[in-house]
Image (spheres, grey):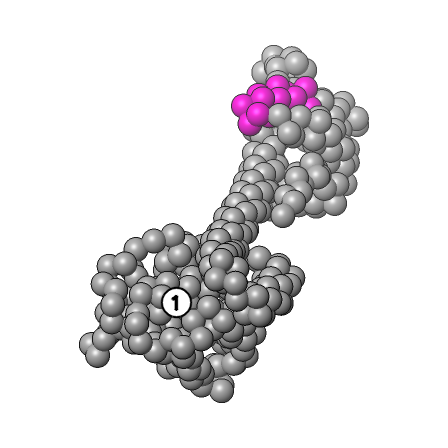
Amino acid sequence: MTVSVPNKRPLMGHQMAFLTIVGFWVFHALIVSLRAAVLEFPEQGEMATRRIAVTVVGMALTWLLYLILRHFERRPLGVRVATAFIAAAPCAFAIAWANYYVFNVYDPVSVFSDQELGRKFMDIQAELGLTAWQEVAEIAISRYFFLIAWASLYLALGYAREVREAERTASRYAQAAQDAELRSLRYQVNPHFLFNTLNSLSSLVIKGDKDRAEEMIQNLSTFYRTSLSSDPLEEVTLAEEVELQKQYLGIEAVRFPERLRTRIEIVPSLLNEKVPALILQPLVENAIKYGVSRSTRPVTVSISAEGSDGWMTIAVDDDGEDSPAKDHGNGIGLANVRDRLEARYGDSAKLTNGRRPDGGFCASITIPISPEDPA
């Protein structure tokens, strides 16, 4: 599985930045206008017009701040925060100058309907002795914190998107690791089975049983052609998995013509349920290795499946009596099955095994039934 690294797209697009800037400044203008109305400032229409002009200038300078921050958006968070605090200062100062010019330099008397009152207001300002720089500095401080508030929103949204990207990337890598684990576990099955089968074939060749050896080779070829044609990450239907085990049992039947008996008991409604490919192979191999090969009498190997309350239990058992239960329950095969079940289903599947009360051994797996087709 190839994990693609996401393109480093902007953390915030132009459209989202524009909407947040407009939203911030429109909200600010509305609050200031509401305050002016509550305090019954004169000439509300004239004040609103000039306020709109300052708001447009503020939007333009905030957009400039956005372009500066955008240039640093993939840098460490500390760098971005420092950039926001530094770049907001000249922008706030420029907005303050625009505000001072519109309300204090450009025909300030016309703000008042009573021209005499307007002149008196100007005289009072002159008596206070505040220089233009002082007034601009006072306005700049308030606008600075306003810009920092917008920059904080921008940085928070950008950081949140980075976190989501990191989570998606981590999820893809985790999935890739799980897929690699499933492939590894699946591929462990084939060499293990091939080793056992070649041993059986070698025994037939040594005995000079050419016909049975040829039959086993043909069955082995069919089995591998079927088992290797599927993707290790894909699942197969229970019917396909059981059919594959029938082929394997056919191979072993050549080796144990007098001792191996088979029985298949599958609830028809479960035949289309999905199971990991070759998940039953180690269980059937164990039944042959410990139940059939060590017995001196006919042994029946059974494959059965039942479903109940959203769960499906598939069992492989034999009625051999010559091997202790501990031999069946320990080894690479069963460990492989446990690992594959855990990798595929987590805690939602389990493998149980042990001696049957009436003799023999049983190993069974329990997995959830797919919700699309419950039994």
- Residue at image location 20% in from the left, 76% down from the top: 357
State whether residue 322 is above or below residue 337: below
Picture coordinates of residue 57, whole percent (x, y): 76, 32
Quarter residue 36 falls in: top right
**Label 1: how many Cα within 10 Å (few below 14, some 14–19, many 20+):** many
Horizontal placement of 200 versus 16: left or right? left
- Residue at image location 59% in from the left, 34% down from the top: 155
- Element at badge 1? helix
Pick whichever, 327 or 344, lies toward us: 327
Picture coordinates of residue 262, whole percent (x, y): 42, 79
Picture coordinates of residue 75, whole percent (x, y): 62, 25
The amino acid on which the numbered mark 1 sits, given as a three-letter code, is Ile
Quarter residue 217 falls in: bottom right
Pick whichever, 19 or 299, lies toward us: 299
Pick whichever, 329 or 19, lies toward us: 329
- Residue at image location 47% in from the left, 56% down from the top: 199
Q: Which residue is mark 1?
A: 288
Magenta span main SS:
helix
State whether residue 51 is above or below residue 299: above
The answer to whether one can see residue 27 in this image is yes
Horizontal placement of 68 versus 252: left or right? right
Residue lying furthest right in this view? Answer: 107
Q: Which residues are magenta?
A: 76-93
Pick whichever, 345 or 250, lies toward us: 250
